[in-house]
Image: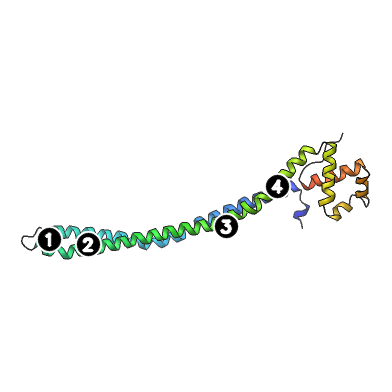
Amino acid sequence: MYADRLPTAIRQLLTDLLVVFWVYAWIRAGIWINDMVEKLGVPGQKLQEAGTGIAGNLGDIGGKVGRVPLVGDELTAPFNSAADAAKSLAEAGRQQQEVVDNLALTMALLIIAVPLALVLFLWLPLRLRWMRRAAVAAKVRNEPAGQDLLALRALASRPLNELAKLGPDIAQSWRNGDAAAVRALAALELKELGLKPAKAR
């Protein structure tokens, strides 16, 4: 209700700021979700570090045991098997981190993509259409033919209560070529587009 009383230019500015803030808020939400999901990869990171460390230690021990004369090769086999198992554990931790990274990125992109799609495919076309209309109206508003076009546009698109404020016979006055009626209707359309009326001649 109160927004209707604001000038169109101010309404457009407020809407633009709201859209920018809305997109920024969703981007921040996407980053926050990404950070939260990334924390699920911490156990995998610890698992990888532990597996790598155990595999390295077992490999070192196996190397030292292997230098024992006569039985070194036989004693080395269990340590090598255990080191391989530890490497598998480290690989499982790495894979878990990779899955978590992909999940975090996917969720963040989804959270950001939906609001951006709404802006790009719903709000932006409306905003560009308004800008084109305003640019054309600003170009023709000081021309007599442009005044007629703007007046006709106002008669076709403005609500009846706004037209009635200009007088009960505003349509008839426009048909009769009344210059004052044409200017009033053109000013009404320009006001809706957030533009100032044409300069008085």
Q: Earlier in the sequence, mark 4 or mark 1?
A: 1
Residue behind mark 3: 114
Q: CA distance from mark 2 to mark 4?
A: 67 Å
Q: Earlier in the sequence, mark 2 or mark 1?
A: 1
Q: Amino acid at mark 1?
A: Val
From what the image shows, is residue 132 above or below residue 111? above
Which mark is drawn over residue 83?
Answer: 2
Task: Give whichever of discs 1 and 3 has the lower sequence position.
Answer: 1
Residue under the point 22% across and 62% down: 83
Give the residue at mark 4. Answer: 129
Q: Position of residue 37 (x, y in %)?
A: 45, 61
What mark, if any, has residue 65 been given in the picture?
Answer: 1
Estimate the spatial distance between the alpha carbons at disc 4 and disc 1, rounded to whole Å: 80 Å
Asked whether residue 45 is in view, the answer is no
- Could you tell me the amino acid type at mark 4? Arg
Q: Examine the image and state in which quarter residue 113 appears.
A: bottom right
Kindly report the distance in space between the C-alpha atoms of the residues bearing marks 4 and 3: 22 Å
Q: Nearer the viewer, mark 1 or mark 3?
A: 3
CB of mark 1 within 8 Å of CB of mark 3? Answer: no
**Amino acid at dot 3:** Val
Q: Quadrant of the C terminus?
A: top right
Q: Residues within 10 Å of mark 3 (few under 14, many from 20)?
A: few
Q: Which is more toward the observer, 127 or 28?
A: 127
Q: Nearer the viewer, mark 4 or mark 1?
A: 4
Q: Nearer the viewer, mark 3 or mark 2?
A: 3
